Image (cartoon, rainbow, N blue to C red):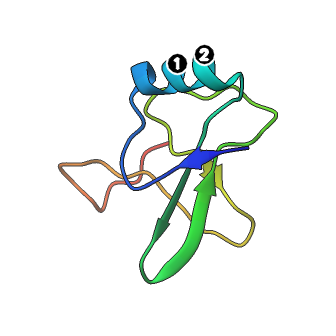
Amino acid sequence: MPSCGGAPLSPVIQRRFEELTGRRLGVAYGLSEAPTTHITPVTRPLRPGSMGIPLPATDARIVDINDRSRILP
């Protein structure tokens, strides 16, 4: 599956890519100091604004933007 990374994928670009190619475009996320940490599963729909789910052996958490010590569900 082709994928993009580095910035959030615009739903307009995603839709246009899929119209032109007939292929699904996934999203991956990683860091300079780490390989890819999150990816869109091929078996799930792509949620706009999502970077996918953590790969195995990846710890991830969502925190409150105003209080980074507060972990969200």
Q: Residue at x 51, y 45 (%)?
A: 51
Amino acid type at mark 2: Glu
Q: Residue at x 54, y 26 (%)?
A: 17
- Are there few (<14), some (14-19), or many (20+) residues within 10 Å of tag 2? few
Between 30 and 18, which is closer to the camera in this rendering? 18
Outermost residue, left side: 66
Outermost residue, bottom side: 33
Residue underneath mark 2: 19
Q: Residue at x 71, y 28 (%)?
A: 23
- Residue 49 lies, with reference to residue 40, above or below; the image says above
Amino acid type at mark 1: Arg
Side of 21 where 7 appears, left or right: left
User: Is the residue under label 1 in contact with that under label 2 (CB below 8 Å)?
Assistant: yes
Residue underneath mark 1: 15
Side of 30 where 38 appears, left or right: right
At mark 2, the secondary structure is helix
- Are there few (<14), some (14-19), or many (20+) residues within 10 Å of tag 1? few
Work out which quarter of the rendered image holds the N terminus and state it: top right
Between 35 and 4, which is closer to the camera in this rendering? 4
Q: Residue at x 52, y 79 (%)?
A: 34
Q: CA distance from mark 2 to mark 1?
A: 6 Å
Q: Residue 12 location in percent, x, y?
A: 41, 19
